[in-house]
Image (cartoon, helix red, strand yellow):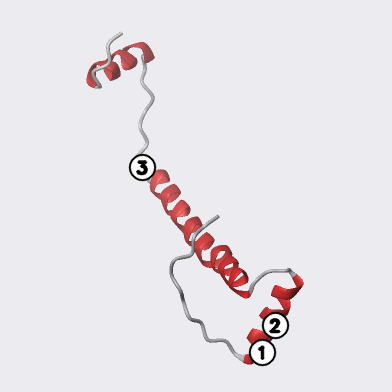
Amino acid sequence: MARYLKKVQVLLTEQQLKELGAIASRDHKKLGTLVREAIEEYHLKKNKQRKIADAVDRLLSLPEVPAPENWEEFEKELARVHGFHE
């Protein structure tokens, strides 16, 4: 289980607190758990998806490299360049 080490203070309206309290009660969760789940699901998940999308965009923008005509020669050259010996 994760250890929570930092505290964040959030101000809510009476209505927000009432509605979140009802949701937490219904789901048998603490209000803090509900808030952490919302942060994880919305902001952190969205940020992770953006990072993945950026990585995919960078991969797709790489220049196209033609396939070697002779795979055996290519593998030998690759082994030589990287110091692998057969």
Q: Earlier in the sequence, mark 1 or mark 3?
A: 1
- Residue 78 in the image: x percent, y percent? 29, 19
- Near mark 3 (Cα within 10 A), the count class, few <14, some 14-19 or many ≥20, is few
As drawn, the residue found furthest toward the top would be 86
> In which quadrant of the rendered image does the N terminus lie?
bottom right
Marks 1 and 2 sit apart, C-alpha to C-alpha, by 6 Å
Marks 3 and 2 sit apart, C-alpha to C-alpha, by 49 Å
Q: Nearer the viewer, mark 3 or mark 2?
A: 2
Q: Which amino acid, by three-letter code, is at mark 3?
A: Leu
- Left or right position of 77 against 8: left
Residue placed at 31% from the left, 12% from the top?
A: 73
Whether the residues at callouts 1 and 3 have beta carbons within 8 Å, the answer is no
- Residue 21 in the image: x percent, y percent? 68, 80
Mark 2 residue element: helix
56 over 36 or under it: above or below: above
Residue position marked by numbered label 3 in the rendering: 62
- Residue 41 in the image: x percent, y percent? 58, 63
Mark 3 residue element: loop
Residue placed at 36% from the left, 11% from the top?
A: 72
Mark 1 residue element: helix
- Residue 16 or 64: which is nearer the viewer? 16
Marking on residue 15: 1
Tell me which corner region of the image, top left, top right, bottom left or bottom right, holds residue 84: top left
Q: Which amino acid, by three-letter code, is at mark 2?
A: Glu
As drawn, the residue found furthest toward the right would be 26
- Residue 75 or 17: which is nearer the viewer? 17
Q: Nearer the viewer, mark 1 or mark 3?
A: 1
Marks 1 and 3 sit apart, C-alpha to C-alpha, by 51 Å
Tell me which corner region of the image, top left, top right, bottom left or bottom right, holds residue 40: bottom right
- Near mark 2 (Cα within 10 A), the count class, few <14, some 14-19 or many ≥20, is few
